[in-house]
Amino acid sequence: MKRLLFLAAVALFAVQPAYAEPIRINLHSCCVTEDATTKEILPAFRKYYKEKFGKDVDVSASFAGSGTLKNQILGGAPVQVAVLSSELYLDQLKEKGLISSDWRKNPNNGAVIKSVIVFVTRKGNPKGLATFEDLARPGTKVLHSSPDTSGGAQWAIFAIYGAGANFRNLTFGPEDGGVKLLSAVEKNVISQPESARQTFVQFDAGFGDAIVTYENEALLEKAKGRDYAISVPRKTIETEWKVARVDRNIRPDQEHAVSELIKFLYAAEAQRSYAKFGFRPVDKKVEKEFHAKYAKVAEPFTVDDLGGWKDARKNVIENAWKKTQAR
């Protein structure tokens, strides 16, 4: 009898760690989502998963410019879920075999949050900067992040180009109004740090008169007590972040938690958390709750108005913008 009790105790001890060990998954998300993700969304998801499924889940998260995160995943970072600001980055991961599922089948064609491109100026907007054309004035010093590492910078460049473009006749040549405006503004760009978040570090240090950035980032910095002015151009681009599974990195024991995390990001609780930190939610009911928080854009446009991501990247960044850098 004693022997049986001893063996039972040994068996119980042997299996106990398997039950106690949490499910571990890794999330890579663009830097502007860090506060919302770490302060509210991941703690809420851990609680939700434990209460609903009776298991602990440990989600480790890393944040940087979307281009940097994409390169880290390509380099072997063991990431199961990615939230990136350019769908081209997700396409590149798919081309390399890291993503095999169709992230466009997620709600909203994969978009989990939205924003618009604005620009931030010094207290009281002393130079009276209200439009992208104003950023082209002689002597105006402009900051935006680098499109080589930051999806936010790509959106910023699209916004500047689109503000001057005639969408009925996109030629991308020297007489194209968007190319002219982009060239004029880029002459005033004094720095292009790695990420949208880092532009504020430089701005705080006294560099520049204006940052071209996401509305959510501008609202977040204002909420932190920064005495900035936010200018919402009459014509600017609507941005979005998309979520995808990195299928190659998902083990069978992680499968359920990964699926639940992606679903949770679309749930009202997570959408409210994103909204608190300045993002525009994709959940229509939550959007109505926070509607007064966001500026109304008179003439919004999307990347589809520029021909879609592939054409916009090729024509606006690889062609038009890169020519502005050869000086």
Image: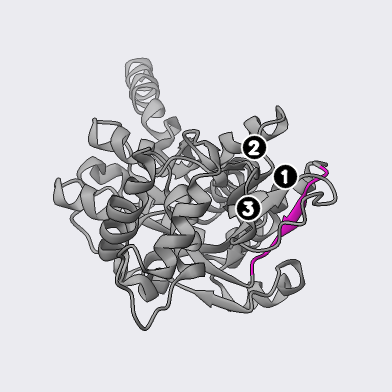
Whether residue 222 appears in magenta in the rendering, the answer is no
Could you tell whether 206 is left or right of 104 in the image? right
Residue indicated by mark 1 = 221
Q: Which mark is residue 102?
A: none
Quadrant position of the C terminus in the picture: top left
Could you tell whether 191 is left or right of 40 in the image? left
Spatial CA span between label 3 and label 1: 25 Å
Instruction: Tell me the kind of residue under disc 3.
Output: Arg
At label 1, counting other C-alpha atoms closer than 10 Å, the crowd grade (few under 14, some 14-19, many 20 or more) is some
Q: Are marks 2 and 1 in contact (CB under 8 Å)?
A: yes
Quadrant position of the N terminus in the picture: top left
* Residue 161 makes an appearance in the image: yes
Residue indicated by mark 2 = 200
**Residue at image x 83%, y 44%?**
227
Residue indicated by mark 3 = 137
- Lower position in the chain sequence, tag 2 or tag 1: 2
Q: Are marks 3 and 2 in contact (CB under 8 Å)?
A: no
Residue 125's place in the image compared with 166, above or below, is above
- Lower position in the chain sequence, tag 3 or tag 1: 3
Instruction: Tell me the kind of residue under disc 1.
Output: Glu
Count of number-bearing discs? 3
Please state which of the two labelled residues, at mark 3 or mark 1, is closer to the viewer: 3
Which stretch is magenta?
227-233
* SS for dot 3: loop
Indicate the quadrant where residue 325 lies.
top left
